Image: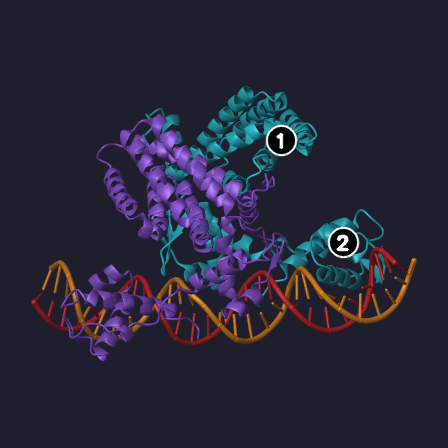
Chain colours: A cyan, B purple, C red, D orange
DNA sequence: ATAATGTCTTTTATCGTAAAAAAACATTTG
DNA sequence: CAAATGTTTTTTTACGATAAAAGACATTAT
């Protein structure tokens, strides 16, 4: 069981969707490009589709014979990459109760628990370490630093520094830069979301990421762009775990984004800074509230008792 | 040959040095703490020392019998960790001629060339990727982005942002903070270096790192502190490869550091910012000059021809 | 002659395994 | 009885091997 063929399975599933839309599949290289896999994998997919009577495959001719049924698809859990599986398991543990700072992380135990080899776990931890939540002791174990109040503050500080700079750079981008088109499209998507926020608020998370990544890209600085990975990762799990008040939070954020977008389009540096600051402030608060310490504070406030000082 | 015992060999060599200073070695746990290794390794060291007649070891008694000779030491090259070996080889290739941006990196080839397993190379590349010089294509090879002019600018931009912020934080640290003592000691070391700069300028590199790390630590932000790893790594290799004009560069830097330190001690925010800005500006120029494009410019300037525009 | 297909080779992703090193537990000593 | 030593177990580090996936080369079709 040395390597799972999840790339193949995932691409196969995506290819099934393609099948619904045409009566003839394109050439192998073209298919490879659309699915983001090599021709080797494409041919594997075509072979199976032919075998299962989905298409008639003879050289260049790939005629669709029937629409895919539910059980033509590989089960979803078989299409995840190993690193996704490890990340999910690890984050579940990290955000679960009892994951306190200072706790040590055992590679072997993690690997056994998830049911994967130690190498994959090691590689995951190394990649994950740049998020600042874990730290390695030389020749020894990893130490959990935890998703704490301090972490939230440090993350928010850097984010603000980077995004203010990026937003400023954004405003001076030339008129013919493609970012303005991207921004228009994002604005339209925000409006769509705003008009049906009651039903579509869960879609915000993904839109949020695209919007901020666009702004960060204006910095033209790889360290700033890469740093957004940290934010995206944290927000991704935060959105999954902390559903309380999500709708109202997202509603506020959409409004702030629209103001922010308007400011960017005005190209007025002062307005941009104000809109950016305002949005980042509420994002900061959201993040802080979602840390274990923050949650206690939120609950204390709701109960009418004064909040503990966590600063 | 599944794992080298470089930890043991390195600790053994360091322990030999300890031998020169005392007639009795301390307890096993204490030795482990000073050498930074486990008791298992300490006992291995003691066993060998006893075997080679360096000490008489009987339980708590570890009497030194003779001073270590030259060939008691393990050869230096056997004390390097695998990751150090890989890093050096990799950097040599990266800074050598013909390492152009876009070039692809082959794990297997690298591993074979260095004579190590592929896993170690993979892990190294993952760790190294945070420096922004390489990038991974999903399910495929790594791509070299190169130590280019753009890289130098992006790095310098972030560095300035982070260090200005850290320096500002430094000035408002309370009087009883240990950093002031650290700063005094560093200042003294700078004076020592300045007085004998002709002979001791190569020692600057290490002092430089300690000084800037102290300042960055005042930010109390893990992302800022961690980012100094990128700078330190780049400067480390830059110092090794680009010896031209090193003495005068270091001399300037020492003077700038002393002014910077004086500003910090004055706790005058404006003075600190000015001194910090000034030093970072020349550091930026040094870095830019050491990129391949930069070197060409420097040479062109020396030859009296106008410099090409690389911005 | 270009672009597709068919075939073969290389590289990456992942595991099991073994030595080195750390850590845990048990025993002795001052 | 606390701190050291002695002993055993666990964990980390690294390698070689193997299946999946990518990539390169050869051949065929339009």
Q: Which mark is residue A199?
A: 1
- Going from N to C along the chain, the mark reached first, 2 or 1, is 2
Give SS at disc 1: helix
Question: Which image quarter: residue B281?
Answer: top left
Q: Is residue A281 above or below residue A77?
A: above
Callouts 2 and 1 on one subunit: yes
Tell me: A113 left or right of B149.
left
Query: Can you say which quadrant of the picture contains the C terminus of chain A?
Result: top left
Q: CA distance from mark 2 to mark 1?
A: 35 Å
Q: Residues within 10 Å of mark 1 (few under 14, many from 20)?
A: few
* Picture quadrant of residue A31: bottom right
Q: Tell which subunit mark 2 falls on.
A: A
Residue depth check, mark 2 versus mark 1: number of the one nearer the observer: 2
- Across the whole image, how many numbered discs are drawn on residues? 2
Residue A13: horizontal and vertical position, in percent?
A: 70, 53
Question: The residue tagged with tag 2: helix, strand or loop?
Answer: helix
Residue A14 visible? The answer is no
Label 2, on which residue?
A: A31
The image position of residue B49, as x and y in percent, is 23, 75
Q: Name the residue at 41% across, 49% down.
A: B246
Q: Residue B182: in sight, yes or no? A: yes
Q: Are marks 2 and 1 in contact (CB under 8 Å)?
A: no
The disc placed on residue B158 is none
- In this picture, residue B205 sits left or right of residue A25: left
Quarter of the picture holding the N terminus of chain A: bottom right
Image mark 1: chain: A
In the figure, B42 relative to B240: above or below?
A: below
- What is the x, y in percent for residue B136? 58, 53
Picture layout, residue B301 above or below residue A66:
above
């Amino acid at each position: 069981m040395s390597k799972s063929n999840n790339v193949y399975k995932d691409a196969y599933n995506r290819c099934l969707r393609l099948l619904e839309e045409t009566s003839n599949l394109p050439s192998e290289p073209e298919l490879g490009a659309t699915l983001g896999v090599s021709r080797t994998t494409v041919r594997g997919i075509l072979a199976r589709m032919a075998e299962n009577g989905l298409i008639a495959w003879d050289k260049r001719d790939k005629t669709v014979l029937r629409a895919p049924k539910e059980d033509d698809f590989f089960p979803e859990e078989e299409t995840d990459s190993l690193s996704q599986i490890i990340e999910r398991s690890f984050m579940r543990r990290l955000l679960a109760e009892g994951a306190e700072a200072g706790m040590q992380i055992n590679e072997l135990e993690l690997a056994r628990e998830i049911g994967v080899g130690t190498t994959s776990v090691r590689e995951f931890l190394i990649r994950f370490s740049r998020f600042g939540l874990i730290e390695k002791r030389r020749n020894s174990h990893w130490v959990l630093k935890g998703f704490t109040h301090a972490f939230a503050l440090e993350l928010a500080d850097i984010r603000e520094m980077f995004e203010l700079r990026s937003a400023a750079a954004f405003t001076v981008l030339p008129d013919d830069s493609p970012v303005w088109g991207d921004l228009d499209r994002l604005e339209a998507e925000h409006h769509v979301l705003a008009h049906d926020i009651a039903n579509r608020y869960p879609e915000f998370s993904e839109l949020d990421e695209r919007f901020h990544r666009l702004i960060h890209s204006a910095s033209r600085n790889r360290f700033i762009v890469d740093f957004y990975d940290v934010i995206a990762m944290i927000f991704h799990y935060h959105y999954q775990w902390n559903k309380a008040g999500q709708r109202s939070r997202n509603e506020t954020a959409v409004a702030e984004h629209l103001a922010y977008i308007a400011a960017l389009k005005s190209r007025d540096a002062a307005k941009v800074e104000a809109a950016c600051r305002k949005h980042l402030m509420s994002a900061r608060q959201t993040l802080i509230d979602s840390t274990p310490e923050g949650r206690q504070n939120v609950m204390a406030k709701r109960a009418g008792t004064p909040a503990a000082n966590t600063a």
